[in-house]
Amino acid sequence: MNINVEHQPNCRAVAHIRVPGEEVTKQRNAVIAYFAQQVRLPGFRPGKAPNAAVIKRYGPDIEAELEKQLINDGLRAAIRNEGLEVLNILAINDKMVHDTDSSFSFSAELSLAPKIELPECRGIPVKLPRIEITDADVEHDLLHLRERYTSFQDVEREAAHGDAVVLACKGSLDGQPLAEVMPDAPDHLKEITENWFLLDAEEDFLPGFYAGLVGIKKDEDRTLAINLPEDFAFEGLRSKTLSLAINCKGVKEKAVPALDAEFIKKIGGDEMTEETLRSELKEVIRRRREQARETAKANQVIAHIFEKVEFDLPQEMVNREAQRRTNDIAQRAMQQGISQEELMKQQDEILSSATQQARQSVKVTFILEQLAKKEGMTITDQQLTYALANMAARQKKPVKKFMAEAQKNGLIERMRDDLLLESAMQFLKDNALVEETDPEPEHCDTHSPKEA
């Protein structure tokens, strides 16, 4: 068998394979004999029909099966002889039976696993902050816990930063109602019948909107001129001045509950005390920072290997992962209220971001797979069963039913692969050389809430 493999960029290769005529004849005879044993022809006992009759009746089927077997055998020989690690067969082309010598030739487009030479994976240096939990850290989490129970109370005074205002407003452009001159503008710019706005120093609605509302009082009318930027989300209003006629229906003051016995009982029950609450929060902070350290350690060891090794990636895998990530981004955006039209305007940026993330993800996968192979890592049936049982519990499904479904939909093998990657990552982290640094501030915001 003549085999010539032409390697191409992006982990592609084309295998040109030619099967000798004598091998083709041998395979054809074997296929004809198989058909003769299996088929039933009128006038002949089972398995006794002459080859000529079988060929006359099933000639196209015999040739199709012969071609299939020759291609499969040729590919197996190419993979074995050339040491190829094939991820996918992309296409079979140029199939031909040569009249001169009855040989059969074809070419196969292949997607190959990349060739990776890993650097030393033990003792990768990482820098991680020591975990130290101060009283200020606990106070910070206590404040956020209290803020989850924030209430807003009506006040008869001018609105200030941190207050909520209840507004009705109508938008206009050059003295004409926006709804008339620009019907396709976003509804919330055309008219709001009643909505709450929390006046924040950071403008996240319209530029200058919150600042323009400071000092407004209940039943007051006010007109704001909003200068929209040239990159405003709605193209029709870019660089224009939007006029908003506002009526304030109320001002509400933000009230954060005090850390008293009533509040502690509300969140923790009769047995909870301030001391036990602080102790529990301290443990929550510790676990959060330990998780952050683990994430930082994983990122640093992977970044270290990224710097040391470079290799081509199979474009098909990158494309599939990029498409999956693009779909996820689009789905999240639509759930957040972004229109299909706006998504189309951002599609190049979204695809570029998704492709970059996909390349990183695929590269990490191949590095971890190569490490697992190098270190002889395996996943036992017990580990696999335990992981699947945990997944069944999280989904609140009976284990036996979940296992049966997992067998059918291929989840078991995907889970085995995922566990192997996790094991390889854990190997990198366990063998990292850690240098502890001074603790990093987890937060820098300071609140001065008004307590109820």
Image: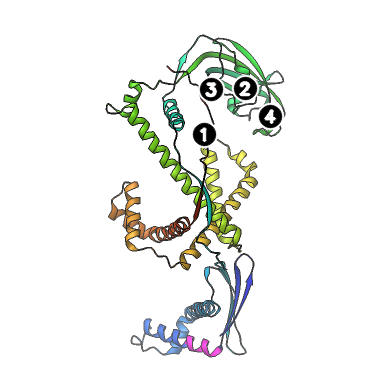
Comparing 438 with 198, the one in front is 438
CA separation in Å, label 2 and label 3: 11 Å
Q: Which residue is mark 3?
A: 198
Residue 237 is labelled as 4
CA separation in Å, label 3 and label 1: 22 Å
Drawn side of residue 5 relative to residue 62, left or right: right
Neighbour class for label 1 at 10 Å: few (<14), some, many (≥20)?
Answer: few
Mark 1 and mark 4 lie on one chain; the one further toward the N terminus is 4
- The percent position of residue 338, horizontal first and vertical second, equals 57, 36
Comparing 166 with 384, the one in front is 384
Neighbour class for label 2 at 10 Å: few (<14), some, many (≥20)?
Answer: some
* Prevalent SS, magenta region: helix
Q: Give the image quarter of residue 316.
A: bottom right
Mark 4 and mark 3 lie on one chain; the one further toward the N terminus is 3
Q: Which residues are magenta?
A: 21-28
Q: Which residue is mark 1?
A: 443
Q: Give the image quarter of residue 116.
A: bottom right
Give the amino acid at mark 1.
His
**Residue placed at 48% from the left, 86% from the top?**
27
Q: Callout 4: helix, strand or loop? A: helix
CA separation in Å, label 4 and label 3: 24 Å
Above or below residue 369? Residue 247 is above
- The percent position of residue 373, horizontal first and vertical second, equals 47, 67
Closer to viewer: mark 2 or mark 1: 1
Give the amino acid at mark 4.
Leu
- The answer to whether marks 4 and 3 mark residues whose Cβ atoms lie closer than 8 Å is no
Quadrant (top left, top right, bottom left, bottom right) of the N terminus: bottom right
Q: Which residue is mark 2?
A: 209
**Residue placed at 64% from the left, 45% from the top?**
349
Q: Callout 2: helix, strand or loop? A: helix
